[in-house]
Image (cartoon, helix red, strand yellow):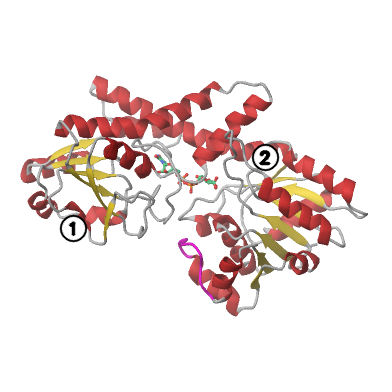
Amino acid sequence: WEGFNVKVAVIGTGYVGLVTGTCLAYSGHSVVCVDSSAEKIAILSSGGLPLWEQGLDELLNETIKLGRICFTTDMKSAVQSSDVLIVCVGTPWGPGGEADLDPLWSVVRQVALYCKQGPFLIIKSTVPVGTSDEIEQWLHTVQTKPSIEVIHNPEFLRQGAAVYDFFHPDRIVAGCRTIQARSVITELYKDIAAHVYFCDRRSSELIKYASNAFLAMKISFINMMADFSEHTGARIDVVAAGMGMDRRIGKSFLQAGIGYGGSCFPKDLQALLSMGHKWNCSLPLLESTVSINAQRPQHLVDKLLHALGTLKAKRIALLGLTFKPMTDDLREATSLAVSRLCLQHGADLHAYDPFVRDYPIAEVVLHRDMYEAIDSADAIVILTEWEQLHDLDWQLVSQKLRTRVVIDGRNMFDWDDMQHVADTCHITYISMGR
Ligand code: UGA
């Protein structure tokens, strides 16, 4: 494999598949992206993107110009013309919280049907421990020689920073069985200056879940401490900064607030818990992580109720709806749970988000202008720490508000600055754990 650019088929064009395919093409490999959705492939073939991801647009155009990437729904030709197949299909929630592997197995069956030689099948999707082994065993029972080798190669891309993360990973993890599989991985990522950690496939599968679970646990831990700070008069941002100075703890993922959302943490924690049930092994730290996170929206709404007395017919301005900034993704966004709770209390909800033009809860009135959303509101509730919110003109805000209550669900504003704003603009500023 050494020195050769690889012919790669990336199967699944979600944000992981598209970022992986585009970045590999940029690295010099020849990439075909396959998806069963003709609609997605049509958008991509005409130079568009079915999702927003920072920096992806430019990189994709560049690789299209270089002729290194193309898009198709034709699985057969993609499989037959490639040396390496990278599966990036989603593993969404199944009915009992377990990962739904139907989309993955559908791809595997097609690979078995069309595959002539014996390429490498890299699974990037987050899959329960043992899945790669099971897939390889199944392929060996249905395939004639030489058989496909399955590699598990998890991704650690953050939405909104996925292109950067692809080229600057902390590590590349690859669960491989043979030397040949290792050399494929080395070749694929030859331009990336990161340590490649080779291990067995089961460990690789668990590294992905355990990493996400650990990060989620850090968030729930700091949120638990935020609640304790409220009881004791400590300030959670000060506590987190002091803790983070210890390199063994690290300062990241200690931002207290309304909890984690998104398409990964909630789903992966449930899947891990359901794996625990399957293997008859309890995972109590994870159960607490999930239950602490589930209480965050209620905690925020309690603060709102405390500040306003009632939410009945109160106009509330929700600022930020996506599960975090720099993404248009609303999956498992905390704003959904907060909106539902406020509506149950009879609130009149208005919202502003720089990216969201369509919200699944019809009762929430969307505004294109931040100040329009704030106009005549009884309270502002910050749900996503969008950079744009740093430009809020507090004098104007205080003129627009009917009742001057601001709840900062993400602790995005500096405490001391806000004490000054509160004094000069007569705003009641409430945040989380301080
Ligand atoms: C996460 C992981 O960070 C990636 O490494 C992983 O590849 C990805 O899941 C995945 O499994 O595909 P992502 O879901 O894009 O990435 O978002 P994060 O930046 O990790 O944030 C997750 C949630 O935690 C957000 O709702 C964010 O607001 C919240 N968060 C994060 C906090 O509440 N506090 C923090 O200190 C950090």
Picture coordinates of residue 185, whole percent (x, y):
73, 54
Does 54 sit above or below residue 212? below
Which residue reaches farthest right? 145
Q: Considering the image in quadrants, where does the N terminus appear?
A: bottom right
Q: Please give the label number shown on residue 205.
A: 2
Picture coordinates of residue 98, whole percent (x, y):
61, 36
The residue at the point 58 percent across, 37 percent down is 95
Residue 64 in magenta stretch:
no
For the magenta stretch, what is the residue range?
Answer: 47-55
**Front in this rendered view, residue 416 or 398:** 398
- Kindly identify the amino acid type of the residue bearing the numbered disc 1: Glu
**Front in this rendered view, residue 132 or 168:** 132
Residue 54 in magenta stretch:
yes
Residue position for label 1: 372
Q: Please give the label number shown on residue 112.
A: none
Estimate the spatial distance between the alpha carbons at disc 1 and disc 2, rounded to whole Å.
47 Å
The residue at the point 25 percent across, 53 percent down is 389
The residue at the point 61 percent across, 40 percent down is 208
The residue at the point 77 percent across, 69 percent down is 77
**Front in this rendered view, residue 350 or 135:** 350
Does 307 sit above or below residue 370? above
Picture coordinates of residue 132, whole percent (x, y):
75, 43
